Image (cartoon, rainbow, N blue to C red):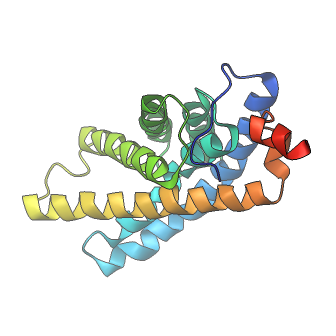
Amino acid sequence: MAQKETAAKGLKLTDILITIVISAVFGVIYRVWGPMYDILKPFGLHAEQLSYGMWFMAATFAFLVIRKPGVALLAEVAAATIEALFGGSWGVSTLVYGLLQGLGAELVFALFLYRRANVGVTILASFASAALSLLVDNYYGYIDQLTFWNYCLFIGLRLLGSALIAGVFAYYLAGALARTGVLSLVRPVSKKDYDVLR
């Protein structure tokens, strides 16, 4: 996958529809993924936080596919909405999480002017999603009683899970999809593509 790519300005209807389709898939995955959190919990020491990165993946993956402003935020909010509609474990708060997680990823991609889509930027976007999800956890009182070392472990494992799933895995999954040629249907043709035709 290209390290640097110029994002065309503005979302077209096809971009929005493709983002919604991606979000629908992730909304179902998010709903099915819920029990993974509970399966890891008995291992203790916040092992369940390693699974958390899956809930940030719609934002990073959708951006890697579409590469336009607003896609990460739209994808994460739409996926959270679909998860909530399918009876997700966290109810209406899922929408708040989706909004902030999508916003976190969106801000990182905006920081790089939507032109960089390498694995490092994708990991940073996953970290931003994780950071904003912690704000919601703190607001709802899920983590405010933790001791300092326990809090650090909690954050560290969430960041690690985010980097591995919403960062590295999302990047290589999008790369594998790009190699099939499918993404040429949704991305504008680049100068490099034209040069190959000469």
From the image, which quarter does the C terminus lie in? top right
Left or right: where does residue 69 sit relative to residue 143? right
Q: Residue at x 28, y 39 (%)?
A: 135
Q: Residue furthest front?
A: 198
Q: Residue furthest bottom?
A: 43
Viewer-proximal residue, 87 or 194? 194
Q: Residue furthest top?
A: 10
In the rendered image, residue 59, in percent from the top left (x then y), is placed at 56, 42
- The answer to whether residue 35 is above or below residue 91 is below
In the rendered image, residue 42, in percent from the top left (x then y), is placed at 34, 78
Q: Residue furthest right?
A: 198
Q: Residue at x 37, y 42 (%)?
A: 128
Viewer-proximal residue, 68 or 38? 68
Q: Residue at x 53, y 40 (%)?
A: 116
In the rendered image, residue 62, in percent from the top left (x then y), is placed at 64, 43
| Residue 78 shows in the view | yes
**Residue 104 sits in which quadrant?**
top left
Left or right: where does residue 135 sit relative to residue 25? left
Left or right: where does residue 178 sit relative to residue 144? right
In the rendered image, residue 51, in percent from the top left (x then y), is placed at 45, 65
**Residue 82 sits in which quadrant?**
top right
Left or right: where does residue 80 sit relative to residue 162? right
Viewer-proximal residue, 123 or 85? 123
| Residue 85 shows in the view | no
- The answer to whether residue 5 is above or below residue 110 is below
Q: Residue at x 71, y 51 (%)?
A: 25
**Residue 11 sits in which quadrant?**
top right
